[in-house]
Amino acid sequence: MQSYASWIVIRRLRVPFIIIIVTFAVSILGMMLIPGQDDQGNVYHLNFFDAFYFVSYMASTIGFGESPYAFTYPQKIWVSMAIYLTVIGWFYGIGTIVALIQDKVLAEEIARSKFVTDVREMNEPFILIFGYNNVTKNLIQRLSQIPRRMVVIDKDESKIDALQLEGYHPHIPSFHGDLLDVSVVEMAGIKSPMCKSVVIVFEKEYKNTRIAMMCKYLNPEAKIIVRSNTLQNNDYLYTIGIDHIENPFRVISNRLHLALTAPHLWMLEMWVHGHPLQIGLHERIPRGKFVIYGYGRMGRALETGLVKANIEYIFIDAGDIFTQNQKKVEKIFSEEVLENKLIDAGIDDAAVIVAGTRDDMVNLAVIMLARKHNPDIYTIARENSLSDLKIFNAANIDRNYILEEIVANKTYNYIAKPLANAFILQLTKRDDKWGRAIVNRIVTKLGRKPHLCEMSATLKQAFALYHELEKGTKVPLKVLKRSRADYTKNSAVIFLLIKRGEEIILLPGDDFLIEQGDQMLIVCNDESEEDLAYILNNYYEFNYVLHGKEKISGVLEWFYKE
Amino acid sequence: MNFDKVISGFFFILAMTLNFGFFYGNPEVLAEHSKYELFAAIVVNLIATIMKFGDKTQVGSVLLATSLVADIQLIGSASIWAIALYGLGGLDIESSTAIISLSGGALLANITSVVIFVGDTLKSKR
C-alpha cells in the first residue's frame, strides 16, 4: 500500500507554484526590457542575474532597495505593478502551504502512513487486537507489562486518541477504520508473519464471527481468540478452525458447578485468576434453592451447571418488568411487578438469588429487593460492564460475575500464561480430595497469597540449566528446589505442572528428570522466584545447588585439586 | 477533445521547441544563442514540470522524471552562465560550450518526454 500524503501535497501546490513561476517570469522579463540609467547617466539594461536577484527579494517582501542603480520612472512604474503581482502570488502560495499543514485529510494520511510503517517494521511477534474497550484496555495494560507487542484498531477515532494518550511502552501502533473492511485489517498487519495471535472480544456475536472468519482466511497461521456467547456459534467457530473461543457464560457455569461440588478446586481456579488462596465463610455458596432471575444466555448456562451439581432451582422470566407509559414511548421500570415476581418464586425460603439479566440496573434492583425479603440470602449478580464496578462493590454483593473481566482474564491467561490454562483444564478431571491436598500443600509452604510463574528450560530463560543438560548431566527436579543459600535446605517453590511437547505432567516428583525445552509452572513467592531464576541462569549458582560446592574456574583451578 | 491534454501538451511541446531554439547554432559562439530564449525555456520547463505533478500512473512518473532532468540541466546551464560572467570574470569558449551542451542534454530529456506523451495519447481510447 502506497502513501498518499506526498501526492496530496503535490496536488494542492500545483496552482500556487504555477502562479509564482508565471508572475516571477513576467516581472523579471519586464525588468530586463525597460532601460535604466547608471550613476553617470548612461543607458543600461538589467541583466538576468540582476533582475532575478531584485525580483526575488521584492516578491518575498524582504526589499533590500533598488539595485544596481536607483531606478528611473519607467522602471518604478513597472516595479509597482510587479510588487502587487508577485507579492499576491507569493502569499497565495504560502497561504496554501499553511492551510495544508492544518488539513485534516493530510493529517490523517500522515497518521495512516506512519501506522503502516510501524506495523511493517514490527520485527518481533505481535498480537492484533480489535477494538479498544474495557476488556481490551484491561488486557493491553497487563500485556504491555510483560511486555508483549500489540497492534490495535478500532472504528472510533476518539478511542484511538485515548489509547495514544496512555503512552504505552513499548509503542502500540493504532489506527481507526472499518473493522469489517479487509484493506483496514491488512493494513493492521494480519498478513505479517509476525502476527501470531488475534484478539476479537466484542459483545456482538455476529461481528466477532465475521471478523474471525476474515482473519482466519487472511492468516491461517495466527491463533485467533474470539468471544462467543452462545453454544451454536461456538460450534460454528470450531468448524472454521478458530483456535480459542471465549465464552464467559460457560466459564461462569463451570465455576458455579465447581463451587457447589468441589470448593477446593474452585479455590484453585480462582487463585490462578488472581484471587487469594482462601475462601471466607460468607463467600461459600450454600447448596440450597436457587432463584434465578432472567432466563437468557446466562440463565441457560447456569442451568447446566446446577443440573450437573444436582441443585434445586427456579427461573423467573425477566420479560415484562417494564410497563409502557401510555403517552410516552419511554419505558418505565416497575418495582412492584418485579417484587411480586420474586415473591411468587418463593424468595423467602430461597438460599441463593442470581440476578442474571443484561441490564446492570435491573440486576442491582433484583438484589436489593431479594435482600429486603430475605436478609440472609446469598447474592450472585451478573455485571455486564466494567464501568459499573464501583456501584456493584458498594452494593456488597456476595459473588459478582463481571463478564468483561472474565473475558479479559481468560484471554490474558491464554496468551501470557498457557500453562496456567492447562492447569485449569486438568482441574476439571480431578476430585475435591485431590484439590484439598494441593491447597494444603501450597498454603503450608507459601501462605495464602503465593503467585504463579512460568519458566522453561530454554537457552533464553535458563542459560545454565540448558548448557548443563546439553553436556548430558542428569538433573532431577529436586536440584531446582534447593536453596541457593544452603543446598541442604529447600526453597519455597512447588512445581505444579511440567509440559513437555504435548504431554502434561501434573505435580512431577523429586526424581523427575528435566529435559531441554520443558515448560514449568511454578508456585512461588517474590524471593523464591528470583532465586530460581538465578539458579537457572547463573553457572556458579547452578553448580552449587547441583554439587553442593562452589565452582572453581580460571587460574585457581591449578591450586585446588579435587 | 480533452482540454487538459491540450494545455499539458502545449507546455510539453513548447518546452521542447524553446529548448531546441536555444540549442541550435554554433556552440562556441554565444551570440548565436539568445539569453531570452534560455529564460523562456526555463520558465516553460518549470510550468511543464508542475503540470506533471500529481499523476500517479507509471507513465506519469516517467514524465515527471524527464521533466526534472530537463529542469536541472537548464538551470545548471543558466547558473554556469551567471557564474562564468560574474564569478570568473567573463565568458570563454569552454564555459559557452558547457552552457550549450547542458541545454542539449535538457533537449534530449524533453524529446523523451514528448515521445512518451504522444505515445500515451495514441494508446488512449478516449
Image (tube, rainbow, N blue to C red):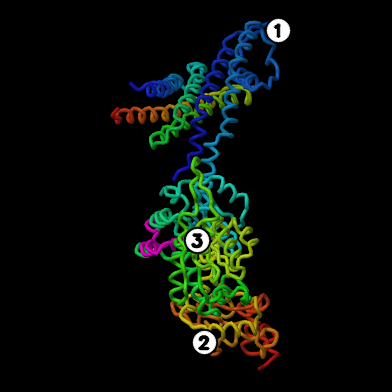
Secondary structure at badge 1 equals loop
Which numbered disc flags the more N-terminal residue, 1 or 2? 1
Chain holding disc 1: A
Q: Which residue is mark 1?
A: A40
Q: Position of residue A381 (x, y in %)?
A: 55, 64
The correct choice, above or below, for A554 with respect to A413 in the image is below
Q: Position of residue A92 (x, y in %)?
A: 58, 23
Quarter of the view holding residue A216: bottom left
Q: Position of residue A199 (x, y in %)?
A: 48, 59
| Closer to us: A259 or A498 | A259
| Closer to us: A369 or A138 | A369
Q: Amino acid at mark 3?
A: Lys
- Residue A378, numbered label: none
Q: Quadrant of the N terminus of chain A?
A: top left
Q: Amino acid at mark 2?
A: Leu
The correct choice, above or below, for A164 with respect to A62 in the image is below
The magenta segment is: A216-237
Inter-mark Cα distance, 2 to 3: 62 Å
Q: Which residue is mark 3?
A: A341
Q: Is residue A223 magenta?
A: yes
Q: Residue at x 48, y 16 (%)?
A: B32
Which numbered disc flags the more N-terminal residue, 2 or 3? 3
Inter-mark Cα distance, 1 to 2: 107 Å
Q: Which residue is mark 2?
A: A513
Comparing labels 3 and 1, the label whose residue is closer to the camera: 3
Whether marks 1 and 2 lie on the same chain: yes
Q: Amino acid at mark 1?
A: Gln
Secondary structure at badge 2 equals loop
